[in-house]
Image (cartoon, grey):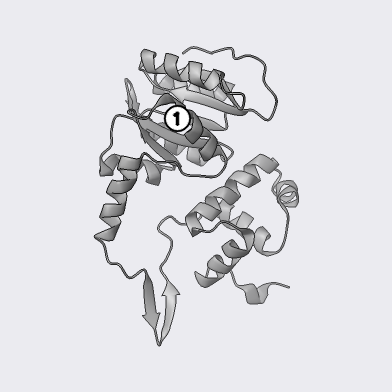
Amino acid sequence: MSNHPPEAKPEATIRVCVVDDDERMLQSLTQAIDSHPDLSLLACAHTLAQAYDMLDRHSPNVVLVDLGLPDGNGLELIRYIHANRPGCESMVFTVFGDESHVIASIEAGATGYLTKDTRTDDIVSRLLQLHAGGSPISPVIARRLLTRFRALEPDHTVETKGTETPAPLVTPLSDREMQVLEMVAKGFMQAEIAELMQVSINTVSTYIKRIYRKLAVNSRTSAVHRASELGLISLRERP
């Protein structure tokens, strides 16, 4: 593993780690990330074992993960990050563009998926997009997923006595995400939630991004309304 010593950058810089055994690709990514004023490359790992050690030593905001590693599958690392690093996002960067790998990665907790034919400049912009709360995905992958979902049942609601009930979440909220959602519904601000949960504001922000993504909303009000529709919370119990 190579701990790359980046030049000093502002504290607001997005901290990135890369896990890939392709040395040429690592060199290209290193140059692109280090040349961007808002990104800082903390370290690189070539194997799963090195990646776990890297995460013990560093606290990245984003980890770029290849799936095909010499000692295992990058999905293992993505699951670990999702379960143990709530303030960190993981984005797949791989040669695999088939549906099964994409679905498995999303289920493991990845919030972005790029294939290795993506231009280096585009990868940098997607890292920024991911950290800002987006879920970047290669166009060819997005097209395949859209085709798949269009082939499924088009009615996304269930009619009950003349009313429509939203379909249940494909990816349920975790216990911690539900805790944050309850506090958001009660009107607590991020700083207050962070203090109550004894975590950083960045961690709370990450939870909220995940809640928004899973509920398919982009605001606190919409999140509370959507959660109420799904029966996750009861607004009648709120003061």
Q: Nearer the viewer, residue 151 or 20?
A: 151
Residue 169, given in percent of the width and then of the height, sits at 43, 61
User: Which residue is at 59% across, 38% downward?
Assistant: 87
Residue 63, given in percent of the width and then of the height, sits at 49, 30
74 with respect to 153 (left or right): right
User: Which residue is at 58% across, 68% downward?
Assistant: 225
The residue type indicated by label 1 comes to: Ile
Q: Is residue 125 above or below residue 153?
A: above
Residue 150, given in percent of the width and then of the height, sits at 28, 59
Q: Is residue 18 above or below residue 164?
A: above
Specify few, some or many for label 1: CA neighbours under 10 Å numbering under 14, 14-19, or 20 or more. many
Q: Is residue 144 above or below residue 38?
A: below
Q: In which quadrant of the rendered image does the C terminus lie?
A: bottom right
107 with respect to 174 (left or right): left
User: Which residue is at 38% across, 46% downward?
Assistant: 107
Residue 199 can be seen, yes or no: no
Residue 218 can be seen, yes or no: yes
Q: For mark 1, what is the residue?
A: 123
18 with respect to 218 (left or right): left
